[in-house]
Amino acid sequence: MEDVQLDSQEITQETPAKDVFFAPSIHTESILSGASYTHCSPIPESIAIDLQVECVLGVDEAGRGPMVYGLLYLPLTSHKSLLAETHHFDDSKVLTPIIRSNLMQTLCTPSTDLYKSCGWAARVMSARDISSGMLKAAGTYNLNAQAMDATIDLIKEVFAKGVNVKEIYIDTIGSPQVYQKKLERIFPTTMITVAKKADSLYPCVSAASVCAKVTRDSALEVCYQSYLHSISKEEPAVAAEGWGSGYPSDARCSTWLKKNMDPTFGWGSECRFSWATAKDLLEAKGSGTKIDWPADDNEEQSMRVTDFFTTPADEDGVSELAGWFGKRISEEVF
């Protein structure tokens, strides 16, 4: 769940399909425990038989609760013909949740041309780990930095498999120019393009977006099903209502957060505590339980490392170490 304001049409597009496809990228145990993880598909048949085949690779993300990064690669010769012309991968705002789910199911079905030609991967960054990085006391690990690291790690895994990636297309995080230069330093032999709305420009990014969004939707469905098990059977209306799209402009989402907030622990692994909406609810007067942590002892706080290598002075103001070989004699003695 994240701080993005959407209009009603966008909320509909971001609300998961009722029977979303559960891809192999869904690791239920990790999701419920709040752990981040990476899933990689096998190298597709069309590439595995000849690793010298030149490939194109796309990366895109899907937010809300867990941040999911999707990656997809395939032979350059099939880029537009297979993805755009045959299967009609397009801008994520054009594809409905049901169409995305069906495309992902086709990608994961062994008998299909998508399965035989495309490799894909997903990095699921849990809401817990995202919040931990953003809220830590000493130096914030912001969302952009976390996202860049996730993207770089995913691409490195594809190279480590021996796939001959010649072109990379990525939907931008922040400034496209800054992001592209950073990637070009890490992958100097590959042509890299970072652009805004890349999912509407490059079919491989559109397909990566589908991988990310369907994985995200089904991951949140896993979380919601575990929540339903804790609801009493006398509350069917609450269960049917759901938690909506996960954005604050969605009334179902904000209502769910208010009704299901524990005053001490907040929510479960599905919610980012670094999310401003969540922080506001926890800090609102009378909502959350305020906890005062005891301050550390002042003497311990003021100690330095060098304090362990000095000794207290004696009555004459000379420390034990300084006077180890005796005291200095002045000229007046002679």
Image: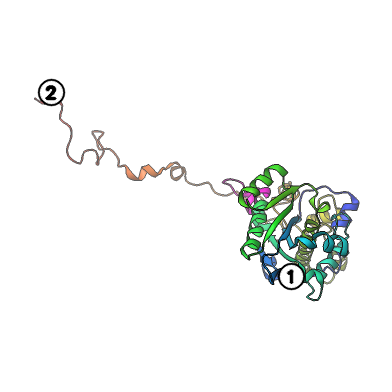
- Which segment did they paint magenta? 132-145
Nearer to us in this view, 3 or 205: 205
| Quadrant where the image shows the N terminus | bottom right
For the C terminus, give its image quadrant.
Answer: top left
Q: Is residue 308 left or right of residue 299?
A: left
User: Which residue corresponds to mark 2?
Assistant: 332
Reply yes or no: does residue 137 show up in magenta. yes
Q: Earlier in the sequence, mark 2 or mark 1?
A: 1
Alpha carbon distance from label 2 to label 1: 96 Å
Q: Is residue 233 above or below residue 285?
A: below
Give the foreground label among 2 and 1. 1
Viewer-side residue, 111 vs 301: 111
Reply yes or no: does residue 282 show up in magenta: no
Name the element at disc 1.
helix
Image location of residue 135, percent across then percent down? 63, 49
Amino acid type shown at disc 2: Glu
* Image label count: 2
Question: What's under tag 1, amino acid-wise?
Answer: Ser
Q: Is residue 125 visible?
A: no
Q: Which residue is mark 1?
A: 46
Q: Residue furthest left?
A: 334
The residue at the far top in this view is 332
Q: Where's residue 215, x and y in %?
A: 76, 64
Determine which of the numbered discs, if any, sits on residue 7 in the image: none
Is 297 placed left or right of 327 in the picture? right
